[in-house]
Image (tube, coloured by chain):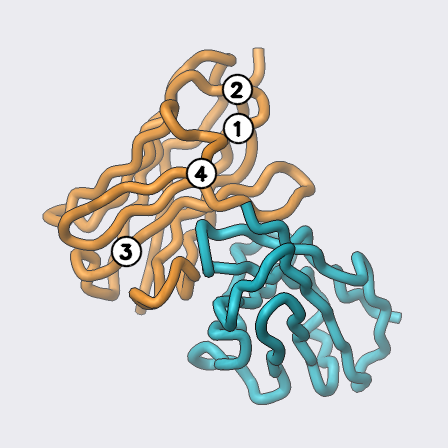
Chain colours: A cyan, B orange
Amino acid sequence: EIVMTQSPATLSVSPGERATLSCRSSQSVSSNLAWYQQKPGQAPRLLIYGASTRATGIPAGFSGSGSGTEFTLTISSLQSEDFAVYYCQQYHYWPTFGQGTKVEIK
Amino acid sequence: EVQLVESGGGLVQPGGSLRLSCAASGFTFSSSAMSWVRQAPGKGLEWVSGITSRGGTPFYADSVKGRFTISREDSRNTLYLQMNSLRAEDTGVYYCAKVLAVSGLYFDYWGQGTPVTVSS
């Protein structure tokens, strides 16, 4: 099983600031990496796939980068609706998710 | 508009069974691979099972292999998950999810989830 590790567990950011979230895999997953956003009581929403391709309807303020074992999700200017938990997921082999990063208001 | 609506969750005793359903609409269900993903209370996401389009080849996480069975009924646009020999650690919200592309198991649409509680 490929283990996904996200950091930090919690990120405190002021509205309008940039947020940078990290995700590391225990072995190379090439670019087979997706990011999701989940708000309380809601289902996850796909943000990024292929490590850097935004899903349909996702604003340009969300960007993904990386390949191999190191990945980053960047939110360029945090809006109130962006405060949520973010998960990375590899699909190079059977899917596994990171434990999540909670982005909270500073 | 794509919609996925799960049903069938509830409270069941350890060792019991449940059958979850997911009614799909707004896309060509028969052409789409599908999956079940679960989330234990206050925890992260765990992929449980998947099934390919048309031929319906199933795949399972090791944690549920031999106990859960995924199936699909394309004529009814419905996905199922038969869960047997349930354990306390199977407790959580179960989401039905549509696979975006043949390039990999990642999910562009999710249902609202159905809760499963395994407890005596």
On the image, the x and y values in percent for residue A104 come to 80, 65
Q: Is residue A14 left or right of residue A45?
A: right
Crowd class of label 4 (few under 14; some 14 to 19; many from 20; radius 10 Å)? some
Q: Earlier in the sequence, mark 1 or mark 4?
A: 4
Mark number, residue B87: 2
- For mark 4, give the secondary structure: loop
Of callouts 2 and 4, the N-terminal one:
4
Q: Spatial distance from mark 2 to mark 4, Cα to Cα?
A: 15 Å
Spot occupied by residue A86 in the image (x, y as percentages of width and height)? 65, 63
Q: Nearer the viewer, residue B26 or A68?
A: A68
Say whether residue B61 is left or right of residue A7: left
Disc 1 from disc 4: Cα separation: 12 Å
Mark 4, residue position = B61
Residue located beneath label 1 in the image: B90
Spatial CA span between label 1 and label 2: 5 Å
- Of labels 4 and 3, earlier in sequence is 3
In front: B42, or B32?
Answer: B32
Tell me if residue A5 comes above or below residue B82 in the rendering.
below
Q: Mark 1 and mark 3 in contact? Answer it, CB < 8 Å.
A: no
- Same chain check for tags 2 and 4: yes
Relative placement, left or right, of A103 versus A82 is right
* Residue lying at 23% horizontally and 65% vertically, measured from the top left: B27
Q: Residue at x 42, y 16 (%)?
A: B85
Give me the C-alpha separation between circle 3 and circle 2: 27 Å
- Residue A60 is situated, as x and y percent measured from the top left of the image, at 57, 89
* Residue at x 57%, y 48% (from the top left corner): B45
Pointers 1 and 2 within a single chain: yes
Residue type highlighted by circle 1: Asp
Q: Earlier in the sequence, mark 3 or mark 2?
A: 3
Residue located 70% across and 56% down the image? A5
The residue that disc 3 covers is B33
